[in-house]
Amino acid sequence: MVTWIVYAGAAVACLAIGLVAAGQAGALGGRRPADLGVHDGRLKPPPSTPNSVSSQAALYEGDGARYARIEPLHFDGDAGTAFERLKQVVSSAPGARVIDSRPDYLYAEFTTPLLHFVDDVEFYLPPGAARIELRSASRLGQSDLGTNRKRIERIRADFAAAH
């Protein structure tokens, strides 16, 4: 019995080491989606899996869309100033790398420190709106254990505090 427990423990340790090594080698980052951006005033729909959040999820159907629902970022005052403030918050967030920055659109990749999973995070400022639409989605996996929602809520808090 003790021998079996030792072997099982060694196997689990080997799997964990292999997973970390795969992440460090970039094997868990996935590929950047080709269909990101704003299309007809909409960000990409949420996937069918519970590993994303989107302020536009109500525009879509399915379990993934129900799970993904989150409020957009609201602001008072000048839209351009608010969007610049958001860009500063995102660019200074841990693990963030801004890929595309325009006056009405921001796209960043967030990479986890240990396993190097990559999440795609987008923000869109609709013309004349006092809100910023958003989407944050994992590239790989079935569940994100709430990571995308926590990230957006942290960005929301930092955005409000920077005002």
Image (cartoon, rainbow, N blue to C red):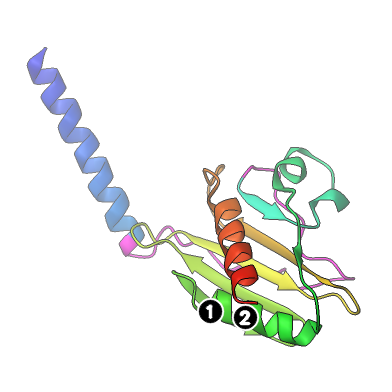
Residue bounds of the magenta highlight: 24-50
Position of residue 62 measured from the top left corner of the image (x, y, whole percent): 79, 40
Measure the alpha-carbon separation of dots 1 and 2. Answer: 6 Å
Residue 59 versus residue 100 in the image, above or below = above
Image position of 140 (left or right of 74): left
Q: Are dots 1 and 2 in contact, CB under 8 Å?
A: yes
Picture quadrant of residue 155: bottom right
Q: Residue drawn 84% across and 72% down?
A: 130
Position of residue 129 measured from the top left corner of the image (x, y, whole percent): 88, 74
Q: Amino acid at mark 2?
A: Lys
Label disc, if present, on residue 91 of the rendered structure: 1
Asked if the magenta segment contains residue 25, the reply would be yes
Label disc, if present, on residue 52 of the rendered structure: none
Q: Residue drawn 57% across and 82% down?
A: 88
Image position of 146 (left or right of 111): right
Report the residue that reaches farthest toward the left: 3
Q: Name the secondary structure under disc 2.
A: helix
Does any portion of residue 34 appear in the rendered image?
no
Q: Name the secondary structure under disc 1.
A: helix
Q: Quadrant of the N terminus?
A: top left
Residue matched to label 2: 87
> What secondary structure prevails in the magenta region?
loop
- For this rendering, which residue is in front, 56 or 74? 74
